[in-house]
Image (cartoon, rainbow, N blue to C red):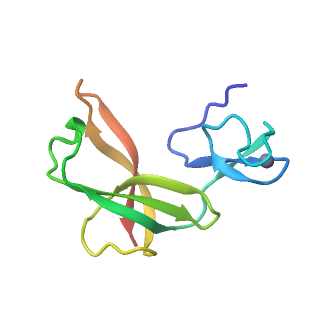
């Protein structure tokens, strides 16, 4: 079964057998190997788990000298990866909120939209 999910929603899969929460791309539960899931959407704000500053951005981000990218965890355990809107005063555990926006134009000139994370 193919599940089409609005790209503006940040969702993961929760195993109906054991409750394990994992990224939506996995076909089977990483814990119990069953394949029956429910969709779980993020809730609340998120906290910064880790981050780095990219000083050699890929070609799509040719208009930037550098940018921050981080791993966040939402209040219900879902994790996400994305750019952070600032490089200043970042610290592990800080609160962020997701914002869906244009992040670049690809090499064909098409606008690419994704979630970025902004300090609260
Ligand atoms: Zn499971």
Residue drawn 24% across and 23% down? 108
Which x, y percent locates residue 12? 63, 47
Image quadrant assignment for residue 53: bottom left
Q: Return the x and y of residue 23 as percentages of the image width and height.
A: 61, 46
In the rendering, at what x and y percent does residue 99 appear?
A: 41, 55
Query: Looking at this view, is 118 or 61 the one in front?
Result: 61
Q: Is residue 91 above or below residue 18?
A: below
Q: Quadrant of the C terminus?
A: bottom left
From this viewpoint, which residue is outermost toward the right? 17
Q: Position of residue 107 (x, y in %)?
A: 22, 27
The quarter of the rendered structure image containing the N terminus is: top right
Residue shown at the point (65%, 49%) measured from the top left: 22
Answer left or right for 94 relative to 42: left
Apparent side of residue 1 relative to residue 18 in the rendered image (left or right): left
Apparent side of residue 99 relative to residue 108 in the rendered image (left or right): right
- Residue at 51%, 39% in the rendered image: 7
Image mark count: 0
Q: Does residue 98 sit above or below 45 in this rendering?
A: above
Residue for point 36% across, 75% down = 91
Q: Nearer the viewer, residue 109 or 56?
A: 56
Horizontal arrangement in the rendering, residue 95 relative to residue 83 (left or right): right
């Amino acid at each position: 079964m193919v599940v089409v999910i609005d790209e503006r929603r940040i969702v993961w899969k929760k195993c109906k057998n054991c409750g394990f929460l994992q990224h939506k791309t996995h076909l089977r539960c990483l814990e119990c190997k069953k394949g029956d899931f429910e969709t779980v959407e993020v809730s609340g704000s998120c906290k910064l788990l880790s981050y780095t500053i990219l000083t050699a951005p890929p070609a799509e981000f040719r208009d930037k000298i550098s940018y921050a990218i981080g791993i966040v965890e939402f209040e219900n355990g879902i994790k996400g990866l994305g750019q952070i809107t600032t490089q200043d005063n970042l610290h592990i555990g800080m609160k962020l909120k997701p914002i869906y926006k244009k992040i670049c134009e690809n090499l064909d000139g098409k606008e690419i939209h994704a979630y970025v994370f902004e300090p609260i």
